[in-house]
Image (tube, helix red, strand yellow):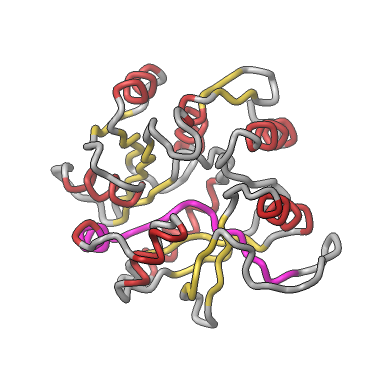
Amino acid sequence: MSVTILIPARYASTRYPGKPLVELRGADGTPRSLIRRSWDAACRVSGADRVCVATDDARIADHARGFGAEVVMTSSAARNGTERCAEAVAAMSNRPEIVVNLQGDAPLTPPWFVEALIERMAADPDMQVATPVLRTDAAALRGFREDRRNDRVGGTTAVFDRADRAMYFSKEVLPYTGRDFAEGEDNPVFHHVGVYAYRPSALEAYAGWPEGRLERWEGLEQLRFMENGVPVHCVEVDARGRGFWELNNPVDVARIEAMLRDQGLD
């Protein structure tokens, strides 16, 4: 199946303006921009035919072309990454069969996270949207709770049913447990990884719907699918011992740089 990975990026982020161009130092101390590291992560995925940065900003576009990325220019009207992906796909002469949205703030995304989505979508032609979820360990759960205690909008949690269909996504820590968990102990809190795989038809439908109420309150674009009756399938993935975090706030720079060093990523 033809697969295109899109990396939506905008400069005017509400919480962190200019975020795609923020530099992160890897294991060897070399600074590389967030968008460059996200593009590198996308290029490590097996089974993708094309990787493009989708942006409305000339600064991001020029920077991305400078390190060799293909760029698709979109309008400034896109309110989130899914809308930007829908716009980019609509402009393509040959639509891929599967579109992957690897958000530009997730440079630590392991390739097997995306490969698992592609595999599930290829196996089930009726599946319209899929996204990975990662069971939190004790350290990750502490990070979630620390963000909430400090009124920071951090990672997203996912709750899903027995058929792996999402029941809800939230910036709050769900489900509520009322207790801590020891190292190595399974807990029911799943970290939603900011990657999506879609059918082009699902993207086209998404672009035609108004912003959802829950989507607006939570600031989570995937809720629009659920508010319009389209199941979002959660694919559980294994970090294989690697740390994972998105860059949501300035404080996350140090967290991600530490993980880059731990993983030996230059």
x 59%, y 49%: residue: 154
User: Percent position (x, y) of residue 62?
Assistant: 33, 19
* One can see residue 35 in this view: no
Specify whether 189 is left or right of 221.
right
User: Percent position (x, y) of residue 11?
Assistant: 39, 30
User: Percent position (x, y) of residue 191?
Assistant: 61, 59
Q: Quadrant of residue 58?
A: top left
| Magenta stretch: includes residue 198 | yes
x 36%, y 40%: residue: 8
How many discs mark residues in the rendered view?
Answer: 0
Specify whether 263 is left or right of 64.
right
The quadrant of the picture occupied by the N terminus is bottom left
Specify whether 204 is left or right of 34.
left
User: Percent position (x, y) of residue 122?
Assistant: 37, 64
x 39%, y 69%: residue: 123
Q: Residue furthest right?
A: 182
Query: Residue 75 or 42: which is nearer the viewer?
Result: 75
Segment tinted magenta in the rendering? 187-206
The vertical placement of 110 against 251, above or below, is: below
Q: Residue furthest bottom?
A: 162
x 37%, y 17%: residue: 66
* One can see residue 157 in this view: yes
| Magenta stretch: includes residue 10 | no
The quadrant of the picture occupied by the C terminus is top right
